[in-house]
Image: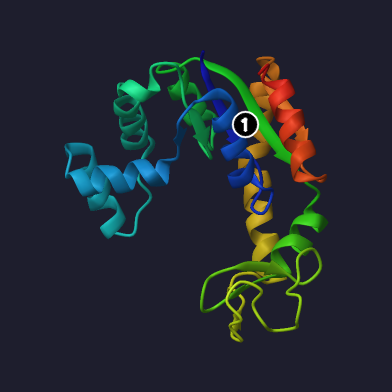
Amino acid sequence: MASIVLFGPPGAGKGTQAVAIMRKTGLPQVSTGDMLRAALAAGSALGLEAKSYMEAGALVPDSVIIGLIDERMQQEDAKNGVLFDGFPRTIAQAEALENIEEIKVVVSIEVPDERIVERICGRYSCSDCGAVYHEKFNPTSVPDVCDSCAGRQMNRRADDNEDTVRSRLQAYHNQTAPLAEWYSNKGILLRVNGDQQIEDVASEIISGIGG
């Protein structure tokens, strides 16, 4: 089995669907954030190089990220492939990844921008236990009282506002549109309607990846 790439805009439900894909395929999930944290913790040469960029407030260059992925693919649990979550982000990264690993399918979870704004801007959570709610789709049974712990302090993330969400969406579209077209031209892009029930999204993905 070769690897799978999963991408989608913020709020599209990638985390939930990644779990479904891992459960079905047995592939481990790999994200650049996880790899960077592991490399930093291990104090590896690439980890120390990445740390120097991060401490300077600079982006970690592709060469380091690709090196980390190359190391990750040598691990035993990656012998049958992995699920890349949020990587690659650019065509240059995709081209470099081709030299390391065969990609079986690229899953693009697609949700209209207006629905993403509605999803993210309506989120809130319990400050005591962290339970997550949504003012429209999953409100607390009693206003401002957590269903899980009966806490009465609800919290909204500062960046869960319309201006910030639309800015993040624009950046995503600018970055991902060329990448999606690139993979589509290779015949391995699977576009999935993310604006439906979670179970239906999962079913569409599993059917599309052949498993």
Mark 1: give few (<14), some (14-19) or many (20+) Cα within 10 Å: many
Is residue 197 toward the left or the right of residue 35 in the image?
right
Q: Position of residue 111 (x, y in %)?
A: 77, 46
Q: Which residue is mark 1?
A: 179
The image shows residue 148, relative to residue 105, as above or below, that is below
Residue type (three-letter) at the residue carrying disc 1: Leu
Q: Position of residue 10 (x, y in %)?
A: 64, 52
> At x 75% / y 56%, what residue is drawn?
116
Most foreground residue, 101 or 21: 21
Display colour scheme: rainbow
Q: Is residue 166 visible to the viewer in this orientation of the structure?
A: yes
Is residue 156 toward the left or the right of residue 48 in the image?
right
Is residue 61 toward the left or the right of residue 130 in the image?
left
Count of all numbered marks drawn on residues in the image: 1
The C terminus lies in which quarter of the figure?
Answer: top right
Q: Is residue 88 visible to the viewer in this orientation of the structure?
A: no
Q: Position of residue 121 (x, y in %)?
A: 72, 68
Q: Quadrant of residue 181?
A: top right
> At x 61% / y 86%, what residue is drawn?
152
Mark 1 residue element: helix
The image shows residue 59, relative to residue 35, as above or below, that is below
Q: Quadrant of residue 90?
A: top right
> At x 24% / y 48%, what residue is drawn?
40
Q: Quadrant of residue 209?
A: top right
Q: Position of residue 171 (x, y in %)?
A: 62, 51
> At x 54% / y 70%, what residue is drawn?
130
